Image: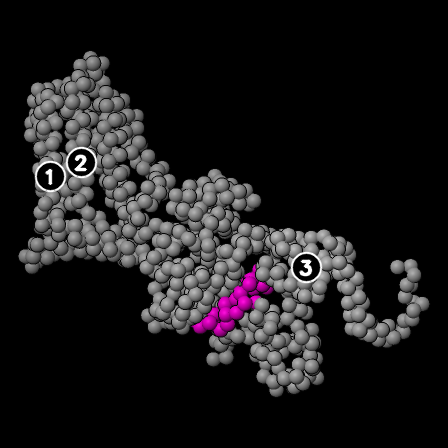
Amino acid sequence: MTSHIPALLLREWMQHKRGWLLTLALPPALFLVILPFGETHGMPDQPLAAGLIVVMATIMVLLLIAALSAAFQLPGLARRDVQDRSIEFWLSLPAGNSESLLATLLAHTLLVPLAAVVFGFGIGYGVAAAVVLKSTGVEGLMAVPWGQVSLLAVPAMLRIALGVVLALVWLAPLILLVMATSAWLKRWSVAAITAVAVITCAILPKVYGFVAIRDWLDLQFAGAWHALLANPQQLASSPAQMASVDSAHAWHWAVMDAANELQALLSWQVASGLALAALGFYLLILQRRRAG
Amino acid sequence: MNNTNLIEARNVTLTYGKKTALNGVSVSVPKGRVVGLLGHNGAGKTSLMKALVGLLPVQGDLRVLGLEPTKNRQQLLTELSYIPDVAVLPRWARVHELITLMGRLQPKFSTERARALLKRTSVGEGDKIKSLSKGMVAQTHLALIAAIDAKLMILDEPTLGLDVISRKSFYEMLIDEWCDGERSVLISTHQVEEVEALLSDVIMLDEGRVALAISLEDIDSRFVALNHDQAAADAMAAAHPLLRYREQGRTTSLFDGTPPEHVASLGQRVRPSLVDLFMALTRNPALNKAQA
Amino acid sequence: MTPTWTDQAPIYQQLADRLAVQLLDGSPSEGEALPSVRVLASQYVINPLTVTRALQALSDHGLIETRRGLGMFVTAGARERLLHHEREQFLQKDWPALKAKLKRLGLTAKDLNWEST
């Protein structure tokens, strides 16, 4: 059964590669073009910190862009292929409904954000060099200890990459329920989701004092955020401290931080979320069956 | 149950809410046949085809290639090829991308064959589906499906939108490549006169029921069409023909079974065309509306 | 090009008649093999089962025979038999109607220019 997933992932690549490449490559390119004309503020004096901060910032910004882009696309993805009836073509080929949905989710919510992290890391060095050059000139650029930057950036990047996977576990119910709403309610889904959000997070708490749902949602988001990057302060609480961090310490931090977050997954909060996620997945499959 | 029949349906019923799409349909299709599925719009042709490929659950006994369609859909789809509609190819894709994806998803698909078949058309491998005319999309879809080495081909109006030359080319391909005595084709079409010579069997559906399921060979022996002049009209009418139609001053009366001797001698025996038989045995919904 | 089929007789019969006409013209000639069922089906764009019926009809009339493993061949004397059959058909069915028409039009043997055709 799972043997169709590579082919289905290839389909996602074929259909969306242009959008993905543009979304990830354009912002850094634009930034580099604008950089000569702008000004840099708030850059730390410490060369190591300066380099590291820009690399990490690049990773986080690209990740944010990828996440936002996925968020915008997911409702449409739930209804993809139905409007032009091409779903009938896909349904005439072997590849189960679960496989197809899984491949779509994997590609857009996991693989693309991970690619953003890795790409951000790679291109981050270039961006960092450009920014440091801009703010402190050639001497500043030469002063950056790129080796040591890497010693800290690599474990941090890997921690964030793992964080993407873990955050997905927390966000899964929201992702799948939003997609299911979009698949079933189509044009009305935006209104429906907005209504649910307003009711559960504003009206129910304020008028009736019923905060359970809002609090549950808060915990999901907080969990996701922490999963991504829980305690960067544990690594180095100030730019000056960064210079004294060595490789072993950095890796130790990354592993401990990750372990904490993995442990956080073993909770009723997450379990309840995954149950809702399963419901969302099932609803999506139901809708796909009816489309044939 | 005859295990060598590719399709074996016994008392198959399909209901959507209040509507009954198929009502007690029983048909068998052995291997090596080209079966025409005829019916007015809404008679149940598409529903039957969807049921055969497991897209719609039915009551009653249904086996396709020995499998239960809804339960073993994935396995079934690796052994048959199905065109739900020739206009449903994904519009974002390029032809060579579809060839690649089909090669990976459909084990019986032959990339070389698909390429060879496409060469006979005016469609290029680099073309985007959305840039192709409706006829060219149909040609592409047909070429892709013809490249699948399936035991059973289920085609829902495959020649819709094709010009005469492309249709003839398709019929030639059907005879050349698919009539090897091992495969069977189930084809629904409105161009009954064009395909009559290609068929070995015919199934006529009328409002969800089988009006007639017979081999063309048996039609020649069972139905008697007598061409006669006006003088014999009353005698003919008295023998209760299924249908009478006029052409160029002469009338043809169509009987199910041999009419009495004295009546038979009044006219000249002609071949009942499939179209005429179809008109005689099924109720035209447009006519029904007009009469109601 | 594929010829169209009339409504006068079942399609297999029409195909058999066409093949018979070709036999009369000597193609293929006696002792020679007919094209295979698949080739004929492809040529006339007809279902192979119908082609088989047509060949069966010709075989029933003794015009062709099956040689095991080799295919269908034109029997010896087939042309003669066919010619005789066609002549009978013409004289009994087609000629009386034609003769009546000639009479109606007042045409005589002299008008027909037989020798020059």
Q: Residue at x 10, y 23 (%)?
A: A248
Name the chain under label 3. C
Q: Which SS class for mark 2? A: helix
Instruction: Name the residue that disc number 2 marks.
Output: A162
Tell me which segment is drawn in magenta: B190-216
Q: Around disc 1, counting alpha carbons within 10 Å, would you say few (fewer than 14), some (14 to 19), or many (20 or more)? A: many
Disc 1 to disc 2: CB gap under 8 Å: yes
Q: Position of residue A284 (x, y in %)?
A: 27, 54
Nearer to us of marks 2 and 3 is 3
Side of C64 where B149 appears, left or right? left
Nearer to us of marks 3 and 1 is 3
Q: CA distance from mark 3 to mark 1?
A: 85 Å
Q: Amino acid at mark 2?
A: Leu
Q: Amino acid at mark 1?
A: Glu
Q: Residue at x 91, y 63 (%)?
A: C113
Q: Amino acid at mark 3?
A: Glu
Q: Position of residue C66 (x, y in %)?
A: 65, 58
Side of A21 where A38 appears, left or right? left
Seen from the viewer's position, the closer of residues B31 and B211 is B31
User: Tag count in the figure?
Assistant: 3
- Both labels 2 and 3 in a single chain: no
Q: Quadrant of residue B119?
A: top right
In the rendered structure, which disc, 1 or 2, sits on the residue that comes first in sequence? Answer: 2
Instruction: Name the residue that disc number 1 marks.
Output: A261
Identity of the residue furthest to the left in this view: A209
Q: Around disc 3, counting alpha carbons within 10 Å, would you say few (fewer than 14), some (14 to 19), or many (20 or more)? A: many
Q: Which mark is residue C65?
A: 3
